[in-house]
Amino acid sequence: MTAPHRSRRMTVQPDWIDFNGHLNMAYYNVLFDRGADDLFAEFGITPDYPAKRGFSTFSAEFHVCYLRELKEGDPVYVTSQLLDMDEKRFHFFQELHHEDGWLSATGEGLGLHIDMSGPKVAPMPADVAQKMRAILKQHSGLPRPDRAGRRIGIPRR
């Protein structure tokens, strides 16, 4: 796997465009989610994970910074970097890039590993945790993203 992880190529769809003529804010999350799906597959967490293993992942928190607008038909990809994890949670950072290389948005998330019988937060199976730890080790050599850990507020002077 590359570090950071790079998703498949995706395309901004016509029905995702808002009345301002650019990508609606909700669809940035769709693109980030699809990029996360590609990363999570590296851990063994795929769409059949709930049915086969009885577990899934839920988002606890996700923050987006919008930097440059995307338009209909734009080709994009998401890079994802695993920042931290424990037995039940994982912290990751994503960047949404136009295929030409420029940065459109960043996203930072906290994911939870879920036992679907509850549903309740639960430890990951050993094989999933092992794969995730290996990727965390690989990603720990990357610089920490400047936008990681940001908070929302209006600075006062």
Image (cartoon, rainbow, N blue to C red):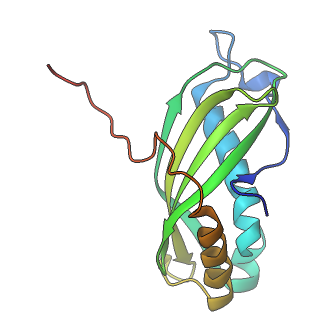
Give the residue furthest to the top. Answer: 20
Placement of 47 over or under 9, stated as above or below = below
Quarter of the image where one finds residue 141: bottom right
Residue 134 can be seen in this image: yes
Give the quarter of the figure containing the C terminus: top left
Q: How many marks?
A: 0
Q: Is residue 18 left or right of residue 146?
A: right
Quarter of the image where one finds residue 105: top right
Give the quarter of the figure containing the N terminus: bottom right
Instruction: Name the residue at 61% across, 20% down.
Output: 68
What percent of the width, then of the height, locates residue 119?
A: 50, 76
Give the residue furthest to the left. Answer: 157
What percent of the width, then of the height, locates residue 92?
A: 54, 57
- Looking at the image, which is closer to me, 54 or 46? 46
What percent of the width, then of the height, locates residue 127?
A: 68, 87
Residue 46 can be seen in this image: no
- Looking at the image, which is closer to me, 96 or 122? 96
Quarter of the image where one finds residue 32: top right
Instruction: Name the residue at 50% across, 51% down.
Output: 144
Give the residue furthest to the bottom. Answer: 126
Q: Is residue 93 left or right of residue 135?
A: left
Q: Is residue 16 left or right of residue 14?
A: left
Placement of 29 over or under 120, stated as above or below = above
- Looking at the image, which is closer to me, 10 or 150? 150
Placement of 98 over or under 53, stated as above or below = above
- Looking at the image, which is closer to me, 121 or 133? 133
What percent of the width, then of the height, locates residue 39?
A: 71, 60
